Amino acid sequence: MPPDSSSGSHPDAPHGTTGPTVTSSDAGRSSTADRAQRVRFRRAVTLMVMTLVIPGSAQLVAGNRRIGRIATRVWMTVVVVTLLSAVVSVFAHSFVFWVASNTLLLGVIRLGLMALAVGWALLFMDAWRLGQPLGLQRQQRLAVVGVNGLLSLTVAGALLFGAHMVDVQRQFMLTMFGDGAVVGAHEGRFNVLLLGGDSGAGRWGLRPDSLTVASIDARTGKTVLIGLPRNMANFPFEEGSPMAKAFPGGFDCDGCYLNGVSTWAQDNTELFKGSDNPGVDATVSAVEGITDLDINYYAMVNLAGFRNLVDAVGGVELTVRDRIPVGLPHDSFFRYIEPGTRTLDGMDTLWFARAREGSDDYSRMARQKCVMNAMLQQVSPETALRNFEKIAKASSEMISTSVPRGEVGRFVELALKAKSQKIATVSLVPPLISTADPDIDLVHSTIATAIDKAEGQAPAPAPVEDEAEAEAGTDPATGTGPAPAPAPAATPAAPPSMTGGSLGTLKDGYAANDSEDLGAAC
């Protein structure tokens, strides 16, 4: 008689009978296998996390130690260099500007970031291999693959994006700035000629319709903007220049104005042998002759591309004091910018600076200085970083300059200093200066006085002519000391005059063209 199988029945037993009973030894083996699976899974995840925190550490623990040592040393070197650079940058901002303008170093950093991206991704793949994914359960294997892929793509992607941004900066420096000679400060100041113009039908090259000299204190960054009208005539050129030899009596030909110097030079390039840009060189010699300032560098802005830069920084906030036309009446997009303090996009900012409808050249010059002040004050380093790629692209398309790459850091640092100070401005325009026949001696003294005031040097008091005048200045009660000034009569303040959106009039002058605080005048 067959034995009674009370612990279970044969697999082929009829439906309804009990199946085989799991023995304690089977349960033990299953529990041990599950624990081993969990240990292997944790080990695989740990190796990937170790690779994320310290690249090469997974190889030191479970893989090729030689590769692990190389990777760890490279990583520690990168960390140390980064920390040292950060510390130096805190105490010496010029170091940051030097790094950002050194194209050779930027190229090395770009290649280094790309190499780190590839090497780190390979270390993640090796860490995944060391985790023995084939020995894991299906769900655990899929989780490990997902985590590894996410980490490797995130890290490599961030490094490659960093390499791209470094390359953008490098190309920006190569495209926009040259490797010309560095020119030292003249009497403690850098004088940079800012030219604004546009190229169009019937025009050869970029005609400078806006001319401003930014005279910058080489130590403090205190800036004086000197505006030159485009319609100035009968002015001298810098002695010894080709233009001075061609016009020894000044630029006195029929219909010859300051903004036409560039065109004249481009039509007579044989006089400028060895010059890469006769138009700019001729204009610089004109500005030096007018202002008696030595120009260090120039920067030419294509106003047609200026709006791209304004759009790249998110617009500019300006106080619009009167309706400013956008375009000309026959343009399909013609409209007006309404009065008020508002943020203007590139198109509106361009026309705010250029419009002459219901205005004049000198009112337009005043508005242009307000735009310059707004751009300097409102474009913060944070804004520049957030929009860096768009700014670099817009700047490369719209600006050409003689500032060498080695000087970029210096001027960035001076610009940051200038942001915290009042900008002074003086313009060589009526009623002070006759643009048709300027008094050059008066021009020179006006500029010198404006610079002296900006540097904190008050003009000397007028000398007393004789004893009678000296006596008239004494206190009648005591016969000694200065007489007290009479109290001014209290009169209601008259509303400010305004022309074309600029405070002031052609007869009395515009506030933004002659001010010790351009921001307040705007």
Image (tube, rainbow, N blue to C red):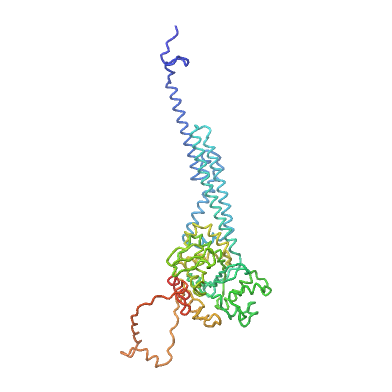
Front one among 163 and 202: 202
Residue 4's quadrant in the figure?
top left
> How many numbered discs, if any?
0
Above or below, 6 relative to 247: above
Front one among 395 and 327: 327
Residue that protrudes farthest toward the right in the picture: 270
Residue that protrudes farthest toward the left in the picture: 477
Q: Position of residue 218 (x, y in %)?
A: 51, 70
Q: Residue at x 44, y 64 (%)?
A: 342
Above or below, 301 relative to 463: above
Q: Position of residue 119 (x, y in %)?
A: 56, 46
Front one among 258 and 352: 352
Locate the C terminus and report the quarter of the image it occupies: bottom left
Residue 185's quadrant in the figure?
bottom right
Q: Position of residue 319 (x, y in %)?
A: 44, 67
Above or below, 438 relative to 65: below
Q: Position of residue 123 (x, y in %)?
A: 54, 43
Above or below, 253 relative to 305: below
Locate the N terminus and report the quarter of the image it occupies: top left
